[in-house]
Image (cartoon, rainbow, N blue to C red):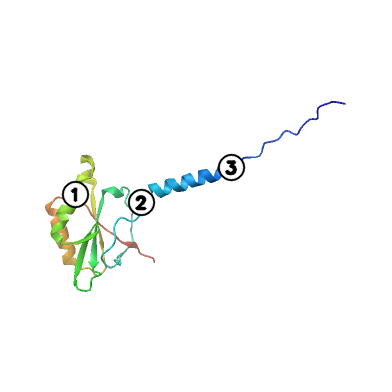
Amino acid sequence: MSKFKKQKKGLPPISTASLPDIVFMLLFFFMVSTTMRETELKIKQPTLPQAHNVSKFEHKNLVSTVYIGKSLDPNNEGDVIQLNDKISRVSDIKTFIFNNREKLLEDEIPFMTTLFKADVNAKVGTIADIKRNLRDIDALKISYAAVEKQD
């Protein structure tokens, strides 16, 4: 008879003591690195037109968004333009684009796009005035926001 008993060879149990630390570390990382919506709409939420072929932007930092629609203020009639977080005039478009160009590298400027998030009922004259100002400063890449048409 032997003095030593043979023990079963198996895997030791996995320690889960550090699991809460890892979960909280991941939670903290995502809370710090996530950005929330940067612009607060001061116009009525635009009802976007429908389109058959919709694509998404690859580089959202190259997109300058112009919101066009009705104001939340009942005293303002007609279409209003929102650039970043403030209601603006059509003549402010040039300054808005120049400020966005300053944030980009020189070789990224040709890829910069102006996105119109215009309400379905927005007047074409307002959009044409904006496009005329964009043409003056050579900002020729324009895109229109739309929702995909459900057949």
Q: Quadrant of residue 83?
A: bottom left
Front residue of 104/87: it is 87
Image position, residue 34 (x, y; %) = 38, 50
14 relative to 62 in the view: left or right: right
The answer to whether 104 is drawn above or below residue 55 in the figure is above
* Residue with the most extreme left position: 136
Circle 3: is it few (<14), some (14-19), or many (20+) Cα within 10 Å? few
Q: How far apart are marks 1 and 2 (CA)?
A: 21 Å
Disc 2 residue type (three-letter): Thr
150 relative to 91 in the view: left or right: right
For the C terminus, the image quarter is: bottom left
Residue 17 disc label: 3
Residue 99 disc label: 1
Going from the N terminus, do you reach mark 1 or mark 3 first? 3
Image position, residue 47 (x, y; %) = 30, 67
Q: Quadrant of residue 85?
A: bottom left
Q: How far apart are marks 2 and 3 (CA)?
A: 31 Å
Q: Quadrant of residue 149?
A: bottom left
Residue 109 disc label: none
Circle 1: is it few (<14), some (14-19), or many (20+) Cα within 10 Å? few
Disc 1 residue type (three-letter): Asn
Q: In what element is the residue under mark 2?
A: loop
| Residue at 75% over, 34% down | 8
Q: Name the residue under label 2.
A: 35
Image position, residue 97 (x, y; %) = 18, 51
Looking at the image, do the residues carrying marks 1 and 2 touch, with CB atoms under 8 Å apart? no
Q: In what element is the residue under mark 1?
A: helix
| Residue at 13% over, 56% down | 133
Going from the N terminus, do you reach mark 1 or mark 2 first? 2
